[in-house]
Image: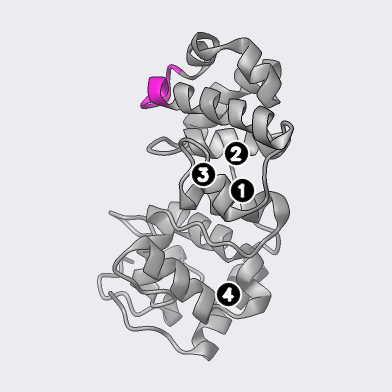
Amino acid sequence: MAAQRDYHTIHAIFRRFQAAEAEPKGELEHVNAYTLLVAVALSAQATDVGVNRATRGLFAVADTPEKMLALGEEGVIAHIRTIGLYRNKARNVMKLSRILVEEYGGLVPSSRAALQALPGVGRKTANVVLNMWWGMPAQAVDTHIFRVGNRTGIAPGRDVVAVERAIEDHVPAEFQRHAHHWLILHGRYICKARKPACGACPINDLCPFEEKTE
């Protein structure tokens, strides 16, 4: 784990991320807050590509909690069978859809506590929805962000909550809105777990990672 970097270095790092892609976007396909919530919940221990492949057909017939309940659990399973843990995920989708209909009038709540109270929705899922749909500076720390945060010293921490807090504490406010996406995309395509593409890294000279590749 690298030591926490200073303000000026972190600012320089995010200026480069911003210059490369000013408006980074999440890769999960969705059409509204509800389909985003379902897609993120389904993405646990699965790839965005795999989730998108499964949800295109699902969301074509069920893009609201009411339609999802009408489709039924077996109907959901038929669409998401290629995703890991699909039975448990389908069960949670049905449960959260029923809660949204009965307690929120079919709408997705916009508070972290309310989101996390839904079946199958953890802190990371809640933060993705808050960030992507409502534009809140919420930091959803996945394995990519955890790795990049520790390798670069942008946000070192021994667990995801510590990394989340380090991002909130040390990343300048002007970059908070998109920090989570910049870090995810950097970890997914450049700062990969086994073979980081350090030669193509836009922040190579600012990164203290000792096991750099060419």
Residues at marks 4 and 3, CA–CA distance in whole angstroms: 33 Å
- Residue 42 is inside the magenta segment: no
Q: Give the residue furthest to the left.
A: 211
Where, quadrant-wise, is the C terminus in this rendering?
bottom left
Q: Residue at x 62, y 17 (%)?
A: 69
Determine which residue is flagged by label 3: 117
Above or below, 166 relative to 177: below
Can residue 203 be seen in this snapshot? no
- Label 1: which secondary element: helix
Q: Main secondary structure of the magenta part?
A: loop
Give the label, 4 or 3, closer to the camera.
Answer: 3
First-in-chain label (3 vs 1): 3
Looking at the picture, which amino acid does disc 4 mark?
Answer: Phe
Determine which residue is flagged by label 1: 129
Residues at marks 3 and 1, CA–CA distance in whole angstroms: 14 Å
Looking at the picture, which amino acid does disc 3 mark?
Answer: Ala
Q: Quadrant of residue 174?
A: bottom right
Q: Are marks 1 and 2 in contact (CB under 8 Å)?
A: yes
The one nearer the camera, 190 or 110, is: 110
Can residue 191 be seen in this snapshot? yes
Looking at the picture, which amino acid does disc 1 mark?
Answer: Val
First-in-chain label (4 vs 3): 4
Give the label, 1 or 4, closer to the camera.
Answer: 1
First-in-chain label (2 vs 3): 2
Q: Residues within 10 Å of mark 2 (few under 14, many from 20)?
A: many
Give the label, 4 or 2, closer to the camera.
Answer: 2
First-in-chain label (1 vs 4): 4
Residue 37: mark in rendering:
2
Determine which residue is flagged by label 4: 14
Q: Position of residue 8 (x, y in %)?
A: 54, 90
In magenta, the rendered stretch is: 81-88
